[in-house]
Image (cartoon, rainbow, N blue to C red):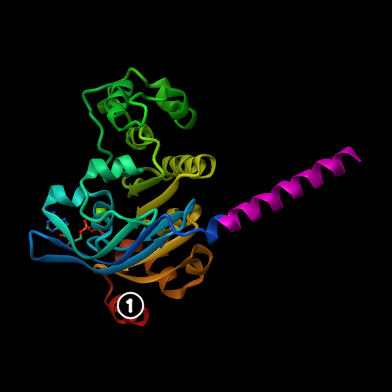
Amino acid sequence: MARKVVTEQRVVEKVDYEIRRKSIVKEEPILELNNVEVVYDKYILVLKGLSMSIRRGSITALLGPNGAGKSTTLKAISGLLKLERGEVTRGHIRFNGENIENRDPLTIVRKGIVHVLENRHVFEELTVKENLVAASYLSPTGEVDFDYIYNYFPQLKLRENVRAGYLSGGEQQMLAIARALVAKPKLLLLDEPSLGLAPKVVDELYGIIKRINEEEGITILLVEQNAAVAFEIADYGYIMENGRIVLDGEISELRENEDVKEFYMGLKGSSRKNFRSAKYYKRKKRWY
Ligand SMILES: Nc1ncnc2c1ncn2[C@@H]1O[C@H](COP(=O)(O)OP(=O)(O)O)[C@@H](O)[C@H]1O
Ligand SMILES: [Mg+2]
């Protein structure tokens, strides 16, 4: 009898959760890119009319081969484009309904968007703790909430006084994400967090990313070349090639898509080879 009550309670909780989730889905998107064009150095056209809509509370994956413009897309959102002589020359980027294209990076951080760059940028000479303190200017309170951060990254707590240069690749990536959490973001932009990490480490890291999304309600835009790992945790996916979105859909749909299976899931670990195959370019046309 008692057992039945517990089960019913669980069912009620699950239904509640589904209702909440559905109402989140109906809300306006947290981020929208509308026909965005990006040019570097006044004439190098990289994004050629990119449109995306990111659901509040989701994990959205942005996939595509090297050079497609994935990092440029994140830099356009976070404002870091400016530091590389890039500019949004057409279209709009709207965050919570407000246009934010071509604003400076600090203004955008203050609005709640934090960008974790490719190649895990940390201060190698500083300890883990000092790295976090160095990010405190991003914090809404000006202080680092260590409990909040170490709850997700207990491994970093153990290594608190170790210089970042001595951490493993996985720990450095954790530190890079932890530094972003100091800002208490609403939207986290992650650029290839799995790059160069062993599969076991990637699993652990992705488990943490998923928890941050679920427990804090932080929306995540995740750039990956490795579709298989992104599909493990994402809700929705966009695939871009050559500065444009060529396909998008719920992850459950993308998983079943023949082109995605062939070119982005690949045979174990050989997806990059597939991108370059001649056949790929022929079949790609079907996506337009
Ligand atoms: N600062 C820059 N100046 C000029 N061209 C750039 C710059 N950054 C990137 N690009 C070019 O933009 C294209 C897309 O790059 P990127 O956004 O880094 O792609 P991805 O992250 O998908 O690999 C590439 O052709 C790259 O050479
Ligand atoms: Mg990139």
For the point 25% across and 37% down, which residue is it? 121
For the point 38% across and 45% down, which residue is it? 188
- The quadrant in which residue 227 appears is bottom left
* Relative to 225, 83 lies left or right: left
Of residues 44 and 87, the one drawn nearer to the viewer in this rendering = 87
Q: Residue furthest right?
A: 1
Give, as a three-letter code, the residue at label 1: Lys
- Residue 8 visible in the picture: yes
Residue hosting label 1? 284
For the point 44% across and 53% down, which residue is it? 229
Of residues 72 and 26, the one drawn nearer to the viewer in this rendering = 26
**Ligand 2, image quadrant it occupies:** bottom left
- The quadrant in which residue 21 appears is bottom right
Magenta range: 1-23
Task: Please state, as top left, top right, bottom left or bottom right, where the N terminus lies in the image.
Answer: top right
Per the picture, the main secondary structure of the magenta-coloured stretch is helix
Of residues 82 and 1, the one drawn nearer to the viewer in this rendering = 82
The x and y percentages for residue 18 are 65, 54
The x and y percentages for residue 132 are 32, 26
The x and y percentages for residue 45 are 15, 67
